[in-house]
Amino acid sequence: MKYSTFCWHYEDLMLPSIHYSHWGKPKLWYGWPESHRENFERAVKDKCSLLFKKDPNILFDVITMISPAYLQSQGVKVYKTLQRPGEFILTFPGSYHSGFSTGLNIGEAVNFTTKTWFPYGMKCQNIYRMSRERIPVFPIEWILIQNIRNLGKTNIDKEVLIRIRDSFKSYLTDELKNRKALESKIKAFYPKD
């Protein structure tokens, strides 16, 4: 449909994505690198302060549209491109993007992981946990454990093995810390007789 929009968002768990246009009118895309994520969030919070007071996690709802010109005036480096049929658009981990269709079109998109994605996924999982509002499509722990369980079935280079090891250590450390905190709360609530 003409002027159908997709509001500002980054992909679930900050996954990269690839979008392909099969047919129809072009899509206009806006986006910026993940390094400008905090600038973007600050600018949107300033512009929509009343909405953020009502719901501090409003950006998770994918309902926010802010003019790219305003964002540029606030120091956010905005990129723009027009996607025509037969073309791909790649979004990088943690990068906000938005846009609209200039008419009827058919496209498809998919999220995927790369060997550099785990730190973004862990960062995003922590953002979700702090907000207590967003539940990811799949828990990052699941993909981490699946990678470990299938180490013998895949050809993984040393760099990826180190990333998996470090991510698992971080996950395990957080899990043990959270279990200990929960145990302390339970003991405080139900003291021994």
Image (cartoon, grey):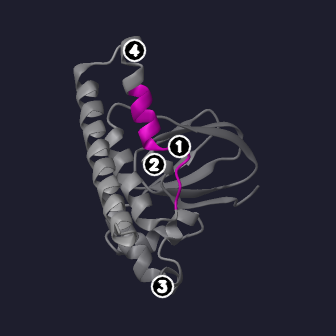
Alpha carbon of mark 3 to alpha carbon of mark 4: how far?
48 Å
Residue 89 in the magenta stretch? The answer is no
Lower position in the chain sequence, tag 3 or tag 4: 3
Check the image and report above or below for 12 versus 133.
above
Taking depth in this image into account, of 159 and 142 the one nearest to the observer is 142
**Where does the magenta region start and end?**
134-147
Q: Which residue is mark 3?
A: 53
Image coords of residue 186 (percent x, y): 38, 64
**Cα separation between marks 1 and 4:** 21 Å
Q: Assign a secondary structure to mark 4.
A: loop
- Residue at image mark 4: 154
Q: Are marks 3 and 1 in contact (CB under 8 Å)?
A: no
The amino acid type, in three-letter code, at marker 4 is Thr
Sequence-earlier tag: 4 or 2? 2
* Quadrant in the picture for residue 119: top left
Q: List the residue tagged with mark 1.
A: 138
The amino acid marked with disc number 1 is Phe
Badge 4 crowding class, 10 Å Cα cut-off, few under 14, some 14 to 19, many 20 or more, is few
Residue 143 part of the magenta-drawn span = yes
